[in-house]
Image: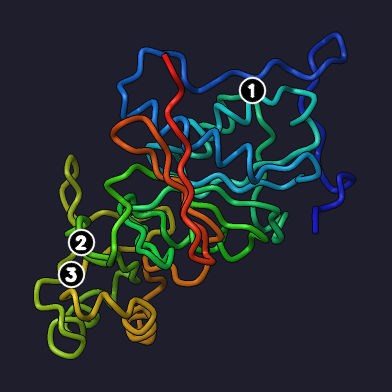
Amino acid sequence: MASPASQIRPMFLSRYGQPAKLVSPIQDQNLSVLEKSKQLAAWTAVDHHVKSEHRVIGIGSGSTVPYVVERIVQLGAEANQERVFIPTGFQSKQLIVSSGLNLGDVDEYPTIDVTLDGADEVDRELNCIKGGGACHLREKVLAEAANTFILVADYRKNVEYLGTNFTPGIPIEVVPFAYAKVLQNLHHILGSPKAELRMAVKKAGPVVTDNGNFVIDAPFDLEVMKKPYTIMAQIKMLTGVVEVGVFCNMAKAAYFGNEDGSVTIRWNDGRVEQVAAPSQ
């Protein structure tokens, strides 16, 4: 059910009383074949799932998401003036603000019409790993809040089983004072001896999430990853764990940009569709 338009703060108006001009986040159109396929995947996802009656839209993170925002901007200021866009993190917040779209928060709009997000990996049943960017707590909140949750990624994320190409492991957000205890549980109870605290690259010390927590990356054997819900639930039960970067039974569809410029669409009912690359 679409959220009532009366709850949406109107878009900033120019001095002439018209909706402010929207700005596309994609300025350089000299894209590689792969980037064009990601763009096509994002555009197709928006065309299929952002309906005219939708008023609250979640915007996720990842390399395909700027193309999602690009397509939304192309819908025009009038189509977007009564919409509010909810970000999953700093990247998506900046995309929303810099594009001139209305920024909102999930505490104001706990029911979202559609959320479009990237993924680190998606299996044949549309379970996915998220959290490579350490945003998976907020990403899962926005996914659960959405009436429709859609994934957009490139072909490297389209796998039979989770953990095939994304090798760092399951991202786990933990409260700082519990990280050593959670690591011990992962090493000796749940069977992830290589689980480790994620360290920052250009900062001394661990990665700190937007929520002030640490992130553990826990790789598991393929046999464990074949049952993603089971391992997700086991990790979530560990005291000190805030959220687990495994999303199960949540996505309606996943759109993958392919190397040849085409798009593969996988649906939660098992259907697979192909969208051909545009002719040059």
138 left or right of 160 in image: right
Cβ atoms under marks 3 and 2 closer than 8 Å: no
N-terminal label among 3 and 1: 1
Q: Quadrant of the C terminus?
A: top left
Q: What amino acid is found at the position of numbered circle 2 in the picture?
A: Thr
Q: CA distance from mark 1 to mark 2?
A: 36 Å
**In front: label 1 or label 2:** 2
Vertical comparison of 192 with 210: above or below: below
Q: CA distance from mark 3 to mark 1?
A: 40 Å
Mark identifier at residue 127: none
- Residue 99: image location, x then y, percent: 59, 25
- Residue 225: image location, x then y, percent: 26, 75
SS assignment at label 1: helix
Vertical comparison of 59 with 20: above or below: below
**In front: label 3 or label 2:** 2
Residue at left offset 80%, top offset 53%: 2
Residue placed under numbered mark 3 in the picture: 219
Q: Quadrant of the N terminus?
A: bottom right
Q: What amino acid is found at the position of numbered circle 1 in the picture?
A: Gln
* Nearer the observer, 116 or 270: 270
Residue placed under numbered mark 1 in the picture: 74
Quadrant in the picture for residue 50 = top right
82 left or right of 95 in image: right
Residue placed under numbered mark 2 in the picture: 164
Residue at left offset 78%, top offset 39%: 52
Q: Residue furthest bottom?
A: 189
Q: What amino acid is found at the position of numbered circle 3 in the picture?
A: Pro
- Residue 213: image location, x then y, percent: 35, 63
Q: CA distance from mark 3 to mark 2?
A: 11 Å
N-terminal label among 1 and 2: 1
Residue at left offset 34%, top offset 42%: 154
